Amino acid sequence: MRKSLRPILLLSLIAFAASAQQSLHFDGYSWWAHVKFLADDSLEGRDTGSEGLRKAQAYAVEQFQKAGLEPAGTDGFYQPVHFIQYQVDESKSSLTLVNKDESKHLSFADDAFISSHATHTSAAISAPLVFIGYGLRIPEKNLDELADLDLKGKIVVYLAGSPADIPTALASHYQTLAERWKNLREAGAIGTIGILNPASMDIPWSRISANHNQPSMDLADPEFNETQGLDLGIAFNPASAEQLFAGSGHTFAEIAALGKNRKPLPHFPLAVSLQAAAAITAKRVTSANLVAKLPGTDPDLKDEFVVLSAHIDHIGIGAPINGDRIYNGAMDNGSGSALVFDIAASLKAHPETLKRSILFLVVTAEEKGLLGSKYFAAHPTVPLKSIVADINVDMFLPIVPLKILKIEGLEESDLGTRAAAIAQSLGVKPIPDPEPLRNAFIRSDQYSFIKKGVPAVKMDVGFELGTPEQKIFKDWLTNRYHAPSDDINQPVDLQAAALYEEITRRQIIDTAKPSARPQWEPDSFFRRYAM
Ligand SMILES: [Zn+2]
């Protein structure tokens, strides 16, 4: 896709110039220039381990040097990270549902696929299936969907999602692969079939399916293995899920209707069982995080760090859509990386009193499961205890004027409440995540810090439910999210980007100044990690 976008851009620039927003440190132009570099076709979608990502990282290092930042990696600005890449050899793999004497072969394109993210070694398995509802065990809410079920040697089937009375952060946390598997393993399960929830799918199955056999990655070091004992992980198309329930006395239609309204789900053994052969290939891949430092000025506080993080990797080259195979990742997350460069330059050009030091962290392998940040949080290049906060920026989507700021983690720490106050001071209304089912709080790199006890927030340009803006965001997710059209030929609002950068800049300064460190709220679930 090489269609020119000039007219749209021009309009947006004129509108911006006319609006006379004083006191902003940003104009949107430099941000867009960085995005254009990172999302250029020549960088081939910046896949982890690729030449394109290395070019993007060389560009990032250039920006850090220009801004006069100090290297803070283990090898200059770089912190090398080692991975193993897994892929399913589908020519040697199969999934078959068996119901009494009848068996039905599942199609890898239409019905289901083996997730190499959850399946790391080849396996041949034949096992009964049990439907476990959402499959959650949440002690804080006295919810145990695994109670009274015999799961020993079974493959569990669950619907992605959570009951309505579970708060967002908690529901998100317990739906991570690691947390989910911890409980299932304890209960004796050997595999999982996750049915995507039609009510909360960001992208349609046709697009998921088109790229279902892209390789996945995990950190090479065994200390990071969170799926020990998981022999088989499968993702299931909700449109094909009815056959799992045949003969069980229940239908998927009934389950999906309950799931749509976040109602409690029943739990019961299924009449069909699964015969599976999974052939997995593995190879080693190396990539790197980038770490740069702007030293603080206070003798007592300069050894403490406020982290500004953004991932620079994207998903590379994939199945063609409208003839385009390059998944450019302009908003995901060229936009956040560009912001990091802009803020670095701005803090140097218009120095503020930064008592604490700022750590600019540009991570790799976010798209592989937050792996770069997970590695950094486990092996930080400054002492973990010296990190007071993480402000993470990922796909903040300046595609409408910035009037509403969605703050993930708003109610979890004073970092959230202070972000809200800064937004308000600039005439922007702060709101918590209006779409908790999307699990956004655990879906980006802030989560790696949260799990190490570090208060964190992620902010995005937002909308209120039932407004025309909601439809703009919904359409963006359906059509552009993780698609080749998340490229530089899309309309963006440069003024919204500039204002968002200003809010982030002020938040960093605000967090670097006072002597008190940000704190988790007393009732925050995530406080436990800080103990
Ligand atoms: Zn992404």
Image (tube, grey):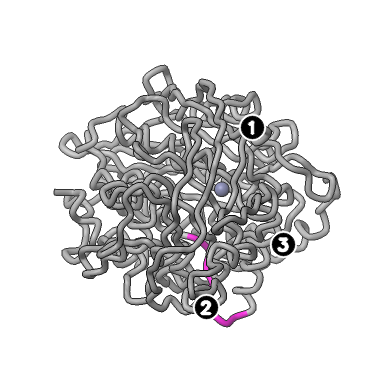
For the question of whether residue 302 can be seen, the reply is no
For disc 2, the marked residue is 254
Whichever of callouts 2 and 3 sits on the residue coming sooner in the sequence is 3
- Which percent across, then down, holds residue 27? 60, 53
On the rendered structure, is 516 left or right of 59?
Answer: left
Whichever of callouts 3 and 1 sits on the residue coming sooner in the sequence is 3
Whichever of callouts 2 and 1 sits on the residue coming sooner in the sequence is 1
Closer mark to the observer between disc 2 and disc 3:
2
For disc 3, the marked residue is 12
- Magenta segment range? 460-467
10 Å crowding of disc 1: few (<14), some (14-19), many (20+): few
Tell me the residue at 44%/65% (across/down). Answer: 161
Q: Main secondary structure of the magenta part?
A: loop
At numbered mark 1, what does the secondary structure look like: helix, strand or loop? helix
Closer mark to the observer between disc 3 and disc 1:
1
Under mark 2, the amino acid is Glu
Q: How many marks?
A: 3
Occupied quadrant, residue 230: top left
The span from disc 2 to disc 1 (Cα, nearest Å) is: 35 Å
Q: Is residue 463 magenta-colored?
A: yes
